[in-house]
């Protein structure tokens, strides 16, 4: 393997892994920002995406560190734009969710926008089993839950 190919493989691997990490990191950032309303979350995701693209555009050069930083920023942008488009499609009922009678094309399009699970719109069917209503089934089992009871605050000391 020549040096140019080896460097290209390393650079692309670093970029892809950094992009995945940046995308995951951006989800954590969005989750920490205290915004309750839907439009506020959309604005936060949009700001993160646009600022990440701008930041990646300013990184010049081909060092491993620069590739990692550029990849992380582009991953942040991609993840937030991906989430925004999925939310837009779901919230505005642009695409019908999958049903038993959906064609292959309809299933494909629904899966593209994260709507491939039929349970996302249909209420789940529960079968009530009589044995599950027995009083002994509702009592907490200390052996199975490591001594944590209902409504108890859990901390590291709870497991000593």
Image: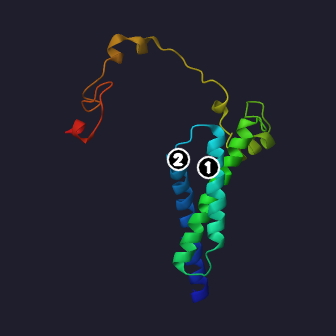
Q: Where is residue 74 in the image (x, y as percent from the top left)?
A: 62, 64
Q: Where is residue 140 in the image (x, y as percent from the top left)?
A: 30, 22
Q: Where is residue 46 in the image (x, y as percent from the top left)?
A: 66, 52
Q: In which quarter of the image is residue 138?
A: top left
Please name the residue shown 25% across and 26% down the image. 142
Left or right: 108, with 23 as reference point: right
CB-based contact (under 8 Å), mark 1 and mark 2: yes
Please name the residue shown 61% across and 49% down the image. 44
Q: In which quarter of the image is residue 66?
A: bottom right
Please name the residue shown 52% across and 60% down the image. 21
Instruction: Look at the numbered disc 1 and give the secondary structure of its residue.
Output: helix
Measure how far apart labels 1 and 2 are at the Cα level. Answer: 8 Å
Quick one: label 1, few (<14), some, or many (20+) residues within 10 Å? some
Residue 149 is at least partly visible in this image: yes
Q: Which mark is on residue 44?
A: 1
Instruction: Look at the numbered disc 2 and give the secondary structure of its residue.
Output: loop
Image mark count: 2
Left or right: 68, with 160 as reference point: right
- Indicate the colouring scheme: rainbow
User: Is 104 or 8 nearer to us in this picture?
Assistant: 8
Left or right: 52, with 33 as reference point: right
Residue 2 is at least partly visible in this image: no
Q: Quadrant of residue 71?
A: bottom right
User: Is 152 or 52 nearer to us in this picture?
Assistant: 52
Q: Position of residue 12 (x, y in %)?
A: 60, 73
Question: Where is mark 2, residue-wise?
Answer: 33
Left or right: 108, with 119 as reference point: right
Question: Which quadrant of the figure contains the C terminus?
Answer: top left
Which comes sooner in the sequence, label 1 or label 2? 2
Q: Eyeballing the image, is 142 above or below 42?
A: above
Question: Which quadrant of the figure contains the N terminus?
Answer: bottom right
Instruction: Name the residue furthest bottom.
Output: 2
């Amino acid at each position: 393997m020549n040096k140019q190919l080896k460097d290209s493989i390393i650079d692309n691997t670093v970029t892809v892994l950094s992009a995945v990490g940046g995308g995951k990191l951006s989800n954590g950032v969005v989750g920490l920002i205290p915004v309750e309303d839907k439009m506020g979350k959309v604005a936060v995701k949009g700001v993160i995406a646009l600022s990440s693209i701008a930041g990646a555009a300013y990184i010049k050069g081909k060092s491993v560190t620069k590739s990692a930083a550029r990849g992380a920023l582009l991953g942040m942008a991609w993840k937030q734009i991906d989430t925004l488009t999925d939310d837009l499609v779901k919230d505005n009922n642009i695409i019908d969710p999958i049903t038993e009678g959906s064609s292959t094309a309809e299933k494909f399009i629904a899966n593209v926008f994260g709507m491939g699970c039929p349970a996302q719109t249909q209420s789940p069917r529960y079968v009530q089993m009589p044995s599950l209503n027995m009083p002994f089934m509702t009592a907490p089992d200390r052996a199975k839950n490591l001594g944590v009871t209902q409504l108890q605050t859990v901390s590291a000391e709870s497991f000593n």
